[in-house]
Image (tube, rainbow, N blue to C red):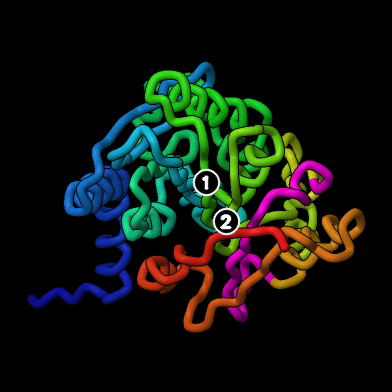
Amino acid sequence: MRHFVSSAFVCCTITLLSACNSVQTRNQNATSLAANSGFDKATYVTHYFSLVAYQKLTSTQATVSIFIEGDGLAWKTKTQISTNPTPRDPVGMRIAFKDTSKNIIYLARPCQFVDIEQEKNCVADYWTSKRASREVIDSYHEALNILRDEHGLNQFRLVGYSGGGTIAAILTAERDDVIDLRTVVGNLDIDKFSEVHQVSALTGSINPANLSDKLLHIPQIHFVADGDMIITSAITDSYVQHIEQTDPELTCINVKTVPDTTHAKNWDTQWRQLSQLIPACR
């Protein structure tokens, strides 16, 4: 007797098998991508989290460009939280590896690319509602302080992709060694994000839009995708409006819409050209 297996069953089976190895595969893909791009892996152990980094450092005399990853696989579905936030497609990493700066460091988000079972603070709150909490921000401060104190790197250019833009903006507001800020489809107003998408507020997270008084004099460029349905124009506009209340001329703010991009597509292929645009105040 011939037995037939439905294509739906096959697809489900393949999906389940892939899921078993997905975290391992994501880690292996990152390692391979880094090796092919000439980046070395490092881990910055902070009080709360171990932050995985891939870096290429060639000069202690130059500034360092810090790239911060997006939220990764924070949610499996709109209602189901992921058990591991390591990104399936690390867009922030791919952008970093296309940069041409003398010193480049890619920083993952907490609990990405690590053994979660060995990390005492890797609970889902830190890739959902508390993704930009004080504990998370302080971990990045510690990592940057290590770079400053141990490697003699004392000027930073911050670049954040998507939710990494939230982190980058907060760090910029709180430090005096960041010379400029760039975000790629960055979430710069988390309250507006929750309003637009009608999702729960990110309670426990810091909103960079509320730090506008500390950001308005920092040279910054915010790259946005035309028609982005995740970081919509309303979210970026809301951040700009916060700045505008104190600086109507928007002296240091530049928002640039980049054609042929989506929230996650084509940023790495365009980054070498975009990276030549250096933030400056008018």
Q: Which residue is mark 2?
A: 182
Q: Are marks 2 and 1 in contact (CB under 8 Å)?
A: yes
| Magenta span contains residue 61 | no
Residue 229 in magenta? yes
Residue drawn at point x = 48 percent, y = 20 percent: 46
**Picture disc at residue 157:** 1
For this view, does 218 lie left or right of residue 61?
right
Q: What's the CA distance linking mark 2 and mark 1?
A: 8 Å
- The image position of residue 59, as x and y in percent, is 32, 37
Q: What's the residue at 43%, 69% (across, down)?
A: 267
Dot 2 alpha-carbon crowd within 10 angstroms: few under 14, some 14 to 19, many 20 or more: many
Residue 245, compared with residue 84, is above or below; it is: below
The mark tally for this picture is: 2
Hey, which residue is sitting farthest top in the picture? 47
The answer to which of 191 and 200 lies nearer the viewer is 191
Residue 259, placed above or below residue 98: below
Q: Quadrant of the C terminus?
A: bottom right
